[in-house]
Image (spheres, rainbow, N blue to C red):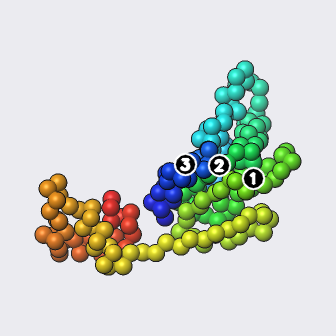
């Protein structure tokens, strides 16, 4: 899933179409709280070419605003970017539905804006092992792409492709028993096979 999303993200046509891009890896341990929300929103603003609220010229981070006000300024700037620019945002490896709901709320539900939803030119890709349910409160068009595990033949082909020695010899054929054991351990996951 991550590899497929990364290939899409880096594709020349995608780079040409989306003027601004952001890639945020989330992990199984990632939990939604005030700190993580601030970090996520600031990172998205930074990657999309905005200036995080605490970096605005003449702005005194220590004294002028509370953390909550800084977060609101950051969310406002992020929403402006998402609604006025052609953006691609990748949320990679979302594990928890509740956290994802809160991320969506922060990305799309900013009340201070006259337009609550980003323009159709902004796209969000989410990679996850979970099946994320559509949220009726957001007017979003959801498209699902389910990746499949590689079968034994495709796993063997990929393993042979990446396990060649410097002189081009197919190491998997020389060490077939060990190779088959490794393929069994990888269970058809392409990323595990190439790592």
Q: On the picture, is 92 further left or further right than 97?
A: left
The residue wearing badge 2 is 87
Mark 2 and mark 1: span between their CA atoms?
9 Å
Callout in the foreground (3, 1): 3
Please, what secondary structure does the residue beneath circle 1 have?
A: loop
Q: On the picture, is 173 further left or further right than 66?
A: left
Q: Dot 1: within a 10 Å radius of its alpha carbon, few (fewer than 14), some, or many (20 or more) residues?
A: many
User: Which numbered disc, 3 or 2, marks the residue that appears first in the sequence?
Assistant: 3
Q: Is residue 58 above or below residue 82?
A: above
Q: Position of residue 16 (x, y in %)?
A: 57, 48
The residue wearing badge 1 is 118
Mark 3 and mark 2: span between their CA atoms?
10 Å
Image quarter (top left, top right, bottom left or bottom right) of the C terminus: bottom left
Q: Quadrant of residue 190?
A: bottom left
Q: Position of residue 124 (x, y in %)?
A: 64, 57
Residue 113 visible (yes or no): yes
Residue drawn at 86 percent across, 48 percent down? 114
Residue drawn at 51 percent across, 57 percent down? 8
Could you tell me if the residues under marks 2 and 1 are in contact, i.e. CB atoms within 8 Å? yes
Mark 3 and mark 1: span between their CA atoms?
19 Å
User: Which numbered disc, 2 or 1, marks the residue that appears first in the sequence?
Assistant: 2
Q: Nearer the viewer, residue 33 or 159?
A: 159
Numbered badge on residue 22: none
Please, what secondary structure does the residue beneath circle 3 have?
A: helix
Residue 36 visible (yes or no): no
Q: Quadrant of residue 171?
A: bottom left
Could you tell me if the residues under marks 3 and 1 are in contact, i.e. CB atoms within 8 Å? no
């Amino acid at each position: 899933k991550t590899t497929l999303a990364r290939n899409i993200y880096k594709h020349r046509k995608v780079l040409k179409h989306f003027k601004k891009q952001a890639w945020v890896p989330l992990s199984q341990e990632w939990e939604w709280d005030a700190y993580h929300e601030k970090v996520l929103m600031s990172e998205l603003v930074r990657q999309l070419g905005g200036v995080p609220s605490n970096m605005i010229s003449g702005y005194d981070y220590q004294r002028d605003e509370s953390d909550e006000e800084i977060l609101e300024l950051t969310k406002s700037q992020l929403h402006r970017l998402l609604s006025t620019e052609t953006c691609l945002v990748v949320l990679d490896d979302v594990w928890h539905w509740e956290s994802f709901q809160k991320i969506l709320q922060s990305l799309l539900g900013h009340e201070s804006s006259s337009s609550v939803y980003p323009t159709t030119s902004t796209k969000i890709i989410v990679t996850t092992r979970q099946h994320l349910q559509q949220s009726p409160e957001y007017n979003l068009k959801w498209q699902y792409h389910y990746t499949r595990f590689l079968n034994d033949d495709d796993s063997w082909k990929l393993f042979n492709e990446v396990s060649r020695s410097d002189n081009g010899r197919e190491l998997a054929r020389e060490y077939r028993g060990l190779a088959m054991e490794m393929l069994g351990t990888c269970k058809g996951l392409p990323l595990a096979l190439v790592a």
